[in-house]
Image: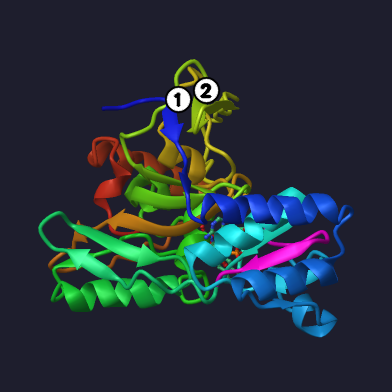
């Protein structure tokens, strides 16, 4: 059954959430050095305050200037929940970072805590041949996962999203950026292939969502935790009729799948800790063609021709690239 009401789950014990909240309330404003010691003592978390180490995680491939006060490298959902809850309660900004290959500055920190996901390597990559699904961690390089899928399926299935940065970007980063590969159109972007997400809100509570399970109604999701309900408005800005892969998804009628809201949201709403992705049958063979055209006008005409020939479905091509 599809519903707009999302029940959040606790990853820590209720008293652990309370304990973190109490610590932060009684130490306002919370000094990072005290928070780091608290997280180490109570949750075994390693939080580095070494400026040289932190600096290496505070910027990305946008080359924008960034800085942070601390770095945390959680290894599982529980550790993610603890550091997020602590930052949330202490009002410390959090920046999630993965392969640091984005070009928009979305993993460039502006102070606060960097949460780097390189140790988030569970669950192990496991495919379901029959359902054509793969369970994946977020802290793995995309290309490594694509190769494991080929191995595990005996070359029968593949994960079709192949951004140029596939050997640098991590799975979680490609989900957060809705990374697009060489297949033209929506089908070449990550969103099309995400079936299920494990997701932590900034307050350290979890949402486990399957595609089709949660759909906003009248522009809202309702987050339910115990007897508390919080309305979560979804973006309704008009989507331009050009490539528009990244940034929070929008639905003019206020009705969207929760998965679509999270894919492409660049870490704004929280942290993806694991996912289930759809796979496709691997084409038996490829025919590579290279056309040399006199100019852009001819390239556009050629695209129109292809569009008609493919009955409006560029997704039938394994790749289409224009070099101007
Ligand atoms: C040479 C080069 C080629 C590229 N080619 C392409 C291309 O062909 N197609 C394309 O789409 N992009 C391309 N990119 C851009 C970039 O590789 C992608 O945007 C990629 O998806 C970023 O992944 P990442 O792991 O590096 O994430 P990062 O750069 O570390 O982070 C990107 C964003 O995702 C968020 N994030 C990361 N992990 C999570 C998580 N688990 N949960 C929540 N939020 C998270 C971060 O907070 C940040 O907002 C290219 C970049 C370079 C440098």
**Dominant SS in magenta:** loop
Quadrant including the N terminus: top left
* Spatial CA span between label 2 and label 1: 5 Å
Q: Residue at x 54, y 75 (%)?
A: 118
Which secondary structure, mark 2?
strand
Few, some or many C-alpha atoms within 10 Å of disc 1 (few <14, some 14-19, many ≥20)? many
In the image, 131: left or right of 16? left
- As rendered, which of 245 and 171 lies closer to the eye? 171
Residue bearing mark 1: 216
- As rendered, which of 269 and 297 lies closer to the eye? 269
Image disc number at residue 220: 2
Q: Is residue 246 magenta?
A: no
Residue 100 visible in the picture? no
Q: Position of residue 141 (x, y in %)?
A: 45, 74
Residue 242 visible in the picture? yes
Magenta region: 105-117
**Does mark 2 have its CB less than 8 Å from ligand 1?**
no
In the image, 271: left or right of 193? right
Q: Position of residue 86 (x, y in %)?
A: 70, 57
Task: Look at the numbered discs 2 and 1 and tell me whether their residues touch, using CB distance below 8 Å.
Answer: yes
Q: Residue furthest left?
A: 130
Q: Position of residue 12 (x, y in %)?
A: 52, 56
Indicate whether 275 appears above or below 2: below
In the image, 76: left or right of 68? left
Q: Residue at x 49, y 27 (%)?
A: 221
């Amino acid at each position: 059954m599809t519903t707009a009401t999302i029940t959040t789950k606790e990853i820590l014990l209720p008293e652990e959430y309370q304990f973190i909240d109490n610590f932060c309330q009684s130490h306002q404003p919370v000094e990072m050095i005290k928070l780091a010691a608290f997280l180490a003592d109570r949750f075994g978390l390693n939080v580095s305050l070494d400026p040289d180490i932190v600096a290496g995680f505070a910027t990305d491939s946008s080359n924008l200037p960034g800085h942070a006060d601390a770095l945390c490298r959680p290894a599982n959902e529980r550790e993610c929940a603890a550091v997020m809850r602590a930052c949330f309660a202490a009002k410390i900004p959090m920046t999630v970072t993965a392969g640091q290959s984005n070009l928009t500055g979305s993993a460039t920190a502006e102070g606060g805590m960097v949460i780097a996901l390189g140790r988030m390597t569970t669950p192990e990559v496991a495919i379901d041949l029959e359902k054509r699904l793969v369970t994946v961690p977020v802290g793995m390089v995309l290309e490594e996962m694509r190769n494991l899928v080929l191995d595990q399926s005996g070359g029968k299935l593949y994960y079709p999203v192949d951004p140029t940065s596939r050997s640098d970007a991590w799975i979680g980063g490609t989900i957060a950026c809705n990374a697009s590969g060489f297949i033209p159109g929506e089908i070449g972007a990550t969103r099309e292939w995400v079936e299920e997400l494990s997701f932590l809100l900034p307050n350290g509570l979890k949402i486990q969502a399957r595609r089709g399970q949660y759909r906003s109604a009248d522009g809202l999701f309702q987050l339910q935790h115990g007897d508390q309900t919080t309305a979560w408005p979804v973006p309704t800005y008009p989507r331009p009729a050009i490539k528009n892969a990244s940034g929070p998804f929008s639905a003019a009628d206020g009705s969207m799948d929760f998965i679509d809201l999270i894919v492409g949201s660049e870490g704004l709403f929280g942290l993806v800790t694991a996912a289930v992705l759809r796979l496709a049958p691997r084409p038996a063979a490829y025919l590579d063609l290279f056309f040399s055209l006199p100019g852009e006008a001819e390239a556009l005409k050629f695209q129109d021709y292809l569009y008609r020939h493919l009955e409006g479905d560029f997704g039938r091509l394994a790749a289409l690239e224009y070099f101007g």
